[in-house]
Amino acid sequence: MPRLNMLMTLMQREAMRLIKNPSALMLLGLMVTFSILLVLSRSEKKPPIGCWIVYPDAFDSFPQGEFKSDFLKTLSQQAKQNRSIRMVPMGQVPKLREQRVYPPLTCAIELLELPGSSEGAKLSIAYRHPGTKSEVLEPFLRWFWPIAVDHFGQIAVQEKAPAISRPLSAATLVMEKLQSGSVGDLMNEDLAAAIQLLIIQFVACCQLMVSFTSQDRERGTLTALALSPITMTELMQAKLLFHLGLAGVGSACVIAVLKPVALANASLWVTLLLTGMGLCSVGLVIASLSKSQSSASLLALCYMLIGAVVFYLATRFSAFATLKSFSFEHYSFGMIYVSLQRSIPLASAVDLRPMLALVAVWLTAANILFRTRGWK
């Protein structure tokens, strides 16, 4: 059983080494500064197109303001994060000759019939948009459909809706966006925030883990610690807790600046925790296999660059997409990106299961290698 006083002493030791190496803190500070610059550069222009989510009057709220439908409750909670989306009952939409009339530059998703939670239930929808181009609905459909699939699981759709028969993977949604979107579409704040969070996780959990562990190994400090009353379990746990905590503080600062509402999204924090544990494990594996600090740092940099190259090639070639599916970063990036936009129920987050399995493999490998040769 790990002793709390030993863990605290080891974590304080890691913190003192971090203070003596301020370059890592400077990099984390630059990430936060970049987030502030992104916020200051936001355009104050209102979105040109708004969207109304119209639901049957029978599902209107109780007197205390709660919806009778759990699906509508979820939609309402997510709509509060997007000022261009408004939810209203059908009775509040004005009519002209039995045709519902919406304000100019406004599209609508009309929920004509809401299903139950049973498999195969039908969701009847009608779309309304100004002009002849239905593309203006695309941003709102990308917001609406993942929520619907998360809630109902498998649903049958009527009224010209896209065919969806299974829960959508966050990683799949991101890959589709990367493959079909233009450069202008991809340069958005959520994507920049997801990339920053991954960089923070890599620096705090992998790069610093490699640097500190390899330096201790070169100086013989790890051997001395291994021969002391401190157990290898306590040493590993202290390293994991310190680097995960540092990554969590840096991530919280970036999220608080760019997307404060996402701080309450449990799926985002679970994903960041698993990503940090995976990268800590990668760092321990690299440090255990390398003979010097310089070679270990170079291998950590190569790991990051190879991952970035494979990720890019996966948008062009299916073989690399298959290869990328064996990395936990493939699932974490999609989950981070989507969780910044909306809260994902953990039971519906299909990407967390393979991600957890891959992180467990890396953690097991790190545990074995560090105990057998990492401290020598």
Image (cartoon, rainbow, N blue to C red):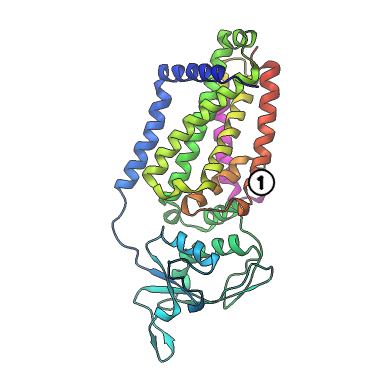
Instruction: Tell me how many marks there are.
Output: 1
Locate residue 84 relative to residue 206 in the image: left or right: left
Q: Which residue is drawn at the image coordinates 68% and 71% (left, top)?
A: 120
**What residue does disc 1 label?**
353
Expressed as whole percent of the image width and height from the top left, the position of residue 67 reads 49, 68
Observer-nearest of 50 and 311: 50
Say if 341 sits above or below 276 in the image. below
Quarter of the image for the C terminus: give it. Answer: top right
Amino acid beneath label 1: Arg
Locate residue 346 relative to residue 254 in the image: left or right: right
Expressed as whole percent of the image width and height from the top left, the position of residue 305 reads 54, 34
Say if 177 sits above or below 114 in the image. above
Expressed as whole percent of the image width and height from the top left, the position of residue 151 reads 59, 62
Helix or strand or loop: what does disc 1 sit on?
A: helix
Quarter of the image for the N terminus: give it. Answer: top right
* 302 in magenta: yes
Q: Which residue is drawn at the image coordinates 59% and 38% (left, top)?
A: 274
Say if 229 sits above or below 44 in the image. above
Q: Taking the image as drawn, is residue 224 in sight?
A: yes
Locate residue 309 relative to residue 81 in the image: left or right: right
Say if 81 sits above or below 39 in the image. below
Expressed as whole percent of the image width and height from the top left, the position of residue 33 reads 34, 37
Observer-nearest of 288 and 132: 288
Observer-nearest of 219 and 157: 157
Q: Taking the image as drawn, is residue 259 in sight?
A: no
Give the magenta range.
297-321
